[in-house]
Image (spheres, grey):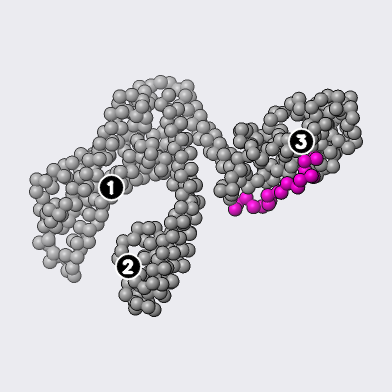
Amino acid sequence: MPIISNANHDFSNLSVSDDSSLDRIFTEIPETETIKGVYYQRAQFIRRPEDLVSIDHGLLAVINVGGNRYTFPWSTLEQFPLTRLGRLCGCRSPEDIASVCDDYDEARKEFFFDRSPSAFRVILNFLAAGKLRLLREMCVLSLHDELTYWGVEMAYMERCCKRKMYTRIEEVHEQERREEERRQKNAMQRVPVEETKYRKVMNWLRDMVENPQSGLPGKIFACMSVIMVAVTVISLCISTMPDLREEENRGECSSKCYNMFIIETVCVAWFSLEFILRFIQARSKLDFLRGPLNIIDAMAILPYYVSLVVTEEDPTQEHDRPGGGKGYLDKLGLVLRILRALRILYVMRLARHSLGLQTLGLTVRRSTREFGLLLLFLCVAVTLFSPLVHLAESELTGPHDFSSIPASYWWAIISMTTVGYGDMVPRSIPGQVVALSSILSGILIMAFPATSIFHMFSRSYQELKMEHDRLFK
């Protein structure tokens, strides 16, 4: 009667375990170590039916899973009382047995479970070798269902495999949530209502402004939006040229300045029209106003109208404002220039039509923990190296650039992020040693969360791409 052991069936080489993916979060139960000569005797695989004759049913339980027969010592099953197999130890009547297994052969004293034999190998490996690991060829969701059925908690799983399983389960739950929201949205759209002319116009308008793949009007609308954003950015750059700034300071407006104003007016008129059309076609006006991109649109459009309402006063009337009319005009002009600079927010509108920008936003939202860790590591390192470089420079070369520890913070930040502007340079040997240590530490600190953020970006891109392909079809 062959024995299931690590020598005959090495399940460890099928595991997706990787020491590089260990997570300190899953440390409530330490990894188990296989004790050779003990665990491998806890399960036996019955290859021939005649081998069942010599089995002592008082010591061994015969388990049939999908046609594969195994024998487990009752003492082994008693060690796992909360599992489905462990509950067999407490069965005293046919009703108790029927509540645990799918069928029972009283003549052979064989418990039958109508489950997948390949999936049961994970449970078998856990009972025989003390290892609960994720097999590479097995679906994570299927394994989760099997563990739930057999009553084996995921807390016994190795940390690396547990991390992969939890990550995949969270992704599936997030995808199911989006699918459910999409189904509810489609169900609301398919509610049998009277097809009036107003509804037809709203549906056509909704497809045009929200779905560029709906037809020629949607494509033209999306192209016009992208063109207007590009024109706005170019006009904003041109408006900061020295000659135009001098004309603005003198209160003059040449033909070039007038043309720039006309271009800005046309672009803002288009963006205002687009915002109004999106607001009109929105089913929920409150949800529309809460949307992040819609808030950015409003912040980019409003400065133009504010600058038209708030006009600068005539400098000849300075005597009417005692105590600094010139200062008031300077402050008002500064506010107007800041409001005009907010037009750069129009660039965020490209996220409506760019899969890459949508992926970037989704990755940032999902990787807040990684970015928080990166910021924490950087703050700790800056706090550590700033006093060291201040001490090295102030004691040996005198307080030149590193006059205080707060002044050294800027040097530590630009050094650890490998920017290095060169405005503050350590000149002593100890200071240069501290600088080398901070640069190497910065490289390592910046690289730690990069892998996790990259994988999150890749998964987010694949999800958004599949969703766009589904909408396109």
Relative image position of residue 352 (x, y in whole percent): 36, 37
Distance in Å between CA atoms under marks 1 and 3: 67 Å
Distance in Å between CA atoms under marks 1 and 2: 32 Å
- Amino acid type, label 2: Met
Q: Which residues are magenta?
A: 24-42
Q: Specify which label sits upstream in the sequence, 2 or 3.
A: 3
Q: Please rate how many residues cluster around mark 3, counting C-alpha atoms within 10 Å: few if below 14, some from 14 to 19, many from 20.
A: many
Q: Quadrant of the C terminus?
A: top left
Q: Please rate how many residues cluster around mark 2, counting C-alpha atoms within 10 Å: few if below 14, some from 14 to 19, many from 20.
A: some
Q: Residue at (42%, 40%) from the top-left corner?
A: 359
The residue to which callout 2 is attached is 424
User: Can I make out residue 462 in this image?
Assistant: yes
Foreground: disc 1 or disc 3: 3
Lateral position of residue 181 relative to residue 320, left or right: right
Q: Is residue 381 magenta?
A: no
Foreground: disc 1 or disc 2: 2
Q: Residue at (13%, 64%) from the top-left corner?
A: 318
Lateral position of residue 231 relative to residue 74, left or right: left
| Badge count | 3
Q: Residue at (30%, 46%) from the top-left corner?
A: 345
46 in relation to 458, above or below: above
Q: Secondary structure at mark 3?
A: loop
Q: Specify which label sits upstream in the sequence, 1 or 2.
A: 1
Q: Secondary structure at mark 1?
A: helix
Q: Main secondary structure of the magenta part?
A: loop
The residue to which callout 3 is attached is 4
The residue to which callout 1 is attached is 344
Residue contact between numbered discs 1 and 2, judged by CB atoms under 8 Å:
no
Q: Quadrant of the N terminus?
A: top right
Relative image position of residue 76 (x, y in whole percent): 81, 41
Q: Please rate how many residues cluster around mark 1, counting C-alpha atoms within 10 Å: few if below 14, some from 14 to 19, many from 20.
A: some
